[in-house]
Amino acid sequence: MQSNEPAKPLPFHDPAHWDKMVATYEAQSQPFTTHFAEAAVALLPIGPSSKVLDVATGTGVAALAAARTGAAVTAIDFSAGMVARVRAHDVANIEARQMDGQALDLPDAAFDAVVSVFGVMLFPDWRAGLREMARVTRSGGSAAIAVWKSADGAAVHLLLSQVIRRLYPEKVTPMPCTGLAELADPDRLSAAIAAAGFADPVVTEVTRDFELSVGNPGEIEKLFEFMPHWSGLDADQSAAVARTFRAEIERGRVGDSFAIPSTALIASTVRR
Ligand SMILES: C[S@@+](CC[C@H](N)C(=O)[O-])C[C@H]1O[C@@H](n2cnc3c(N)ncnc32)[C@H](O)[C@@H]1O
């Protein structure tokens, strides 16, 4: 159901949000996104003579996987904190630069391969993000783009959205200005990638459990404040959602871990 309230700016459109998230992201998300990043990079025909770009690198999972092939990797992110984290890996063949993925400060056709894992889908202008990836890829070069198969994303966000949808369906509105919903479908993902300048995308599904550490529920609920659907709830609604979320975890936890299966679509394609 659509809400008539004006769209609130989304936290993940603000680099300062990601700057604050570096340590949490590294501890909780990176072990999870690494599997998808490695699957995406494995689709790229790259090696020591390749120049590779990782768009919205975060803590650098795809950049690190690409660098292990010997490729010269450029890793960009608009968050200074994320870029600093990638530089701290101190990998000789990764150059990390702070940059907006919607307007890359990089020359045309400069890369043999480009990758973006759960990055471009978050840009307000995700079409520009895809076009920029195509612009900087040489003709015949390759790309791999990973997005979530659900408009609700993955992991805690996916579970939280499911709980809110059950209790307060009117609060789960389509998110403004994001490719999350638009690209969460193989046909629409392929069409968007083709429209950006790539040819014949092939989309594969990869599913992994996000292992949520549930020893400290307060820590999990701190994550909620960054999630768009959560910020639309009043105090009573938030309390009810948190209670239901905790009950869900209690029912399904194994020791201190609760598995949230999450599916990605990974498109591989070639620059026309
Ligand atoms: C969900 S994280 C994914 C990080 C990494 N690729 C991974 O798979 O773990 C999204 C990343 O996109 C970056 N980001 C969001 N909007 C961006 C933009 N317009 N330009 C560049 N980076 C952006 C964020 O700073 C964050 O590091």
Image: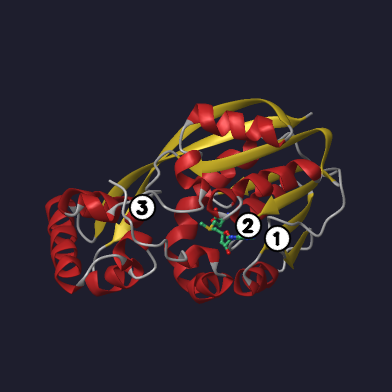
Dots 3 and 1: beta carbons under 8 Å? no
Lower sequence index among marks 2 and 3: 2
Going by the numbered disc 3, the residue's amino acid type is Ala
Which residue is label 3 attached to? 155
For the residues labelled 2 and 3, the Cα–Cα distance comes to: 19 Å
63 displayed left or right of 168: right
For the residues labelled 2 and 1, the Cα–Cα distance comes to: 6 Å
Lower sequence index among marks 3 and 1: 1
Q: Measured from the top left, where is residue 118 in percent x and y? A: 53, 50
50 displayed left or right of 250: right
Label 2 beta carbon within 8 A of ligand 1: yes
Dots 2 and 1: beta carbons under 8 Å? yes
Label at residue 56: 2
Quadrant containing ligand 1 reads: bottom right
Label 1 beta carbon within 8 A of ligand 1: yes
Q: Residue at x 38, y 48 (%)?
A: 174
Judged from the image, the secondary structure of the residue bearing numbered disc 2 is loop
Q: Inspect this view and state whether residue 216 appears.
A: no
Going by the numbered disc 1, the residue's amino acid type is Ile
For the residues labelled 3 and 1, the Cα–Cα distance comes to: 24 Å
Q: Measured from the top left, where is residue 121 in percent x and y? A: 54, 48
Which residue is label 1 attached to? 76
Q: Quadrant of residue 87?
A: bottom right
Q: Measured from the top left, where is residue 104 in percent x and y? A: 76, 57
64 displayed left or right of 265: right
